[in-house]
Amino acid sequence: MALDSKTDTKPQQFKVVGTRPLRPDGIDKVTGRARFGADMSAPGMLVGLVLRSPHPHARIRSIDTSAAEALTGVHAVVTRADFGPPSDPGVADVLDNCMAGDNALYDGHAVAAVAAISGKVARQALKLIKVDYQPLPHVTDVDAAMAPDAPALHEGRADETVPAGMSPNVMARHEFGHGDIDAGLSQADRVLERTYRTEATHQGYIEPHACLATMNADGQADLWCCTQGHYMVRNTCAAILGIEQGQLRVTASEIGGGFGGKTTVFLEPVALKLSQKSGRPVKMVMSRSEVLRATGPTASSSIDVRIGMTRDGRITAGFAELRYQGGAYPGSPVDMGSMSAFAPYDLENVRTVGFDVVTNRPKQAAYRAPGAPMAAFAVESAIDELARGFGLDPLEVRLKNAAREGTRASYGPTYPAIGLEATLRTAKDHPHWSAPLGPNQGRGVACGFWFNFGGDTCVSLNITPDGTVTLSEGNPDIGGSRASMSMMAAEELGIPYDRVRTVIADTGSLGQNEVTDGSRVTFAVGLATIEAARAAKREMCKRAAQVWGIDEDAVIWEDGAARPAGPNAGQHPPMSLAEIAAIASNTGGPIAGHFEVNAEGAGVSFATHMVDTEVDPDTGAVKILRYTVFQDAGKAVHPSYVEGQFQGGAVQGIGWALNEAYIYGEDGILQNPGFLDYRIPVASDLPMIDTVILEIPNPGHPYGVRGVGETSIVPPLAAVANSVSDAAGVRMTSLPMSPPKLLAAIRSGQS
């Protein structure tokens, strides 16, 4: 559903929205009172632990749990045999990922779990479980997995889009575009062909997965967990366990980071099954090693790009073949990568083809604009190389080809009002672009795109008798949504921000809400909040009309109060929200506003990033000197949070470009399952990330809001690579650009 009343594309005037009030969760978090996934406990609680496969690929011939079950203090042991077929076949792969069936498909795949009176006893029990494995050939590289003779993970699972004769590891083929690629390339003065590779990276959230499950004998269950979507958890677990969704109530804890990685389930169905079997509450918390070995990183990729350009910088055609491995199950984000690869540009001839490939790795999960950063790395690197080859300004080339309002997107639709051109012009006029560079230093730019989404949303806004407001929403707050919702409610009601409190309701308190992902919450929940506030305003106008003895149509809401619409309505003094709330019992009872919607019109998002780097020619070490983000936010509800989203995405992209990678040995075992060897950037690695917020209102939202949480991770891979390539004098086409890899490239170029 889209709103009937669209916002004007001209900026609106706001009193609360656009300010920077204190965050409502700040005190609880800095004082340690906030409760995260591992902070909940229950009387009689057991500790649950998981036994994981030491093999990257193996047939499970048998599992003997008798010795573990006999151990004093063990109350339950579960294997796949304890789970029946899911009520929804669509979650079969989710179940198999949570607890292996016939085959263990990656290093770290869960094969059994125990619940015991302590962690010590649970660990002893795991050692007593005897699993008879038959090791099988494995494959962890996407291109190797596409070879005809590659070890097959799933025979016969490919859908009808896959051409005959391809490896059984190719699960799906996606194609997007328009025009004639060959004709377009023939018009170019130069055609560049390159292959680009990126490794899988983890979201790097600090809080590991954790949950506390209680399942009673009557089938009623409660679950506390750290998640980006507790309604998703409810629906998925209910399907896996074969119970009705209404029997399971899920409460979301505070969340210590997610970035897309907590949009599925890993422990939760297992904890519920252990609780059901033991008759006791069961708490499960992953170790860092388990998080890295067994939860979803992003996909790794191999991408072929072919782009034609004229001497004056006009792109005549663009083609890309994208190959993404999404781990052991179908569903890599190669479709999103294929759609977003050329999305920032207005091209007559463009085509992308994407292949979804399975490998013996953990099932990938979303990571902030899933699929787009890898595609942007390839396309933006090629455009940069072509521009520099012709001696052209890389920003001018992007401006010449930039998508604008009315452009037919490479993936199909026609763009409404968008902000890409504004980000490019602002970047070109920014002092960063003209700042001098020193020896061994380079500057890179890149553009990025993300779709943004809406989806099912339900909110309830309640006016209390003292005139304060409680807003209940169903999306975990991972980026400041409680503050943003309170601000939009306050703006619409015309009351101070501190008179509104937003709470995250459990699954029994509101209707269905989609996961907190897709940069959807500020847009979709904000839209629903505004409409719920408007419903409450209509009711308060009705109550005032009742008090005054006039028609409802003769009352308007203005500056936080009901007022006569004009002199013909009578000379009645305004009735404030607090005054109307105080007498609500005498005028009809409690006052509330509700709104449910499948939100549409999210509005796409664009960004341009600029970065300066310095390369040590003797070691290959890269230092980030300066970084500036230019992004269209539609309307920045809380600018501090928006800046934080811009900065966070940039930092994660820097890590992806320079350091982070899943490293698998020839034995198929993950070599770096910990933050000591899987190195994420820390504050001392980085300068302050500068941000420039642009506001091109989204016509699909009453206040012009666009999601901002994901676009910011799309340009950094390419921007950093373009900068490093400029500084080092050698084009880098493989990420991460670790010091050994970069040094080897420099020496190869010198020779």
Image: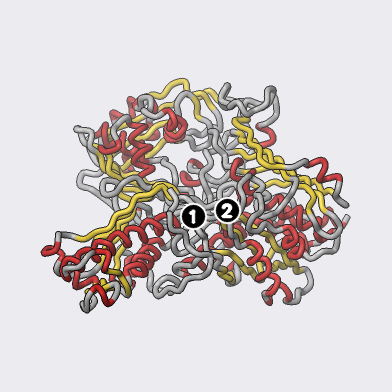
Position above or below: 88 against 280: above
Label 2 crowd bin: few (<14), some (14–19), many (20+), radius 10 Å? many
Residue 396 lies in quadrant: bottom right
User: According to the image, label 1 marks what residue?
Assistant: 519
Amino acid under disc 2: Trp
- Visible residue check, residue 654: yes
Amino acid under disc 1: Ser
Does dot 2 land on a helix, a strand or a loop? Answer: strand
Residue 305, percent across and down?
Answer: 75, 45
Label 1 crowd bin: few (<14), some (14–19), many (20+), radius 10 Å? many
Relative to 466, is 632 on the left or the right? right
Q: Residue furthest front?
A: 568
Name the disc covering residue 450, or none. 2
Residue 197, percent across and down?
Answer: 69, 46
Picture quarter with the C terminus: bottom right
- Visible residue check, residue 724: no
At horizontal 44% and vertical 46% (from top left) the residue drawn is 263
Residue 113 lies in quadrant: top left
Residue 678, percent across and down?
Answer: 57, 52
Q: Nearer the viewer, residue 86 or 511?
A: 511
Q: Residue furthest left?
A: 586
Relative to 107, is 356 on the left or the right? right
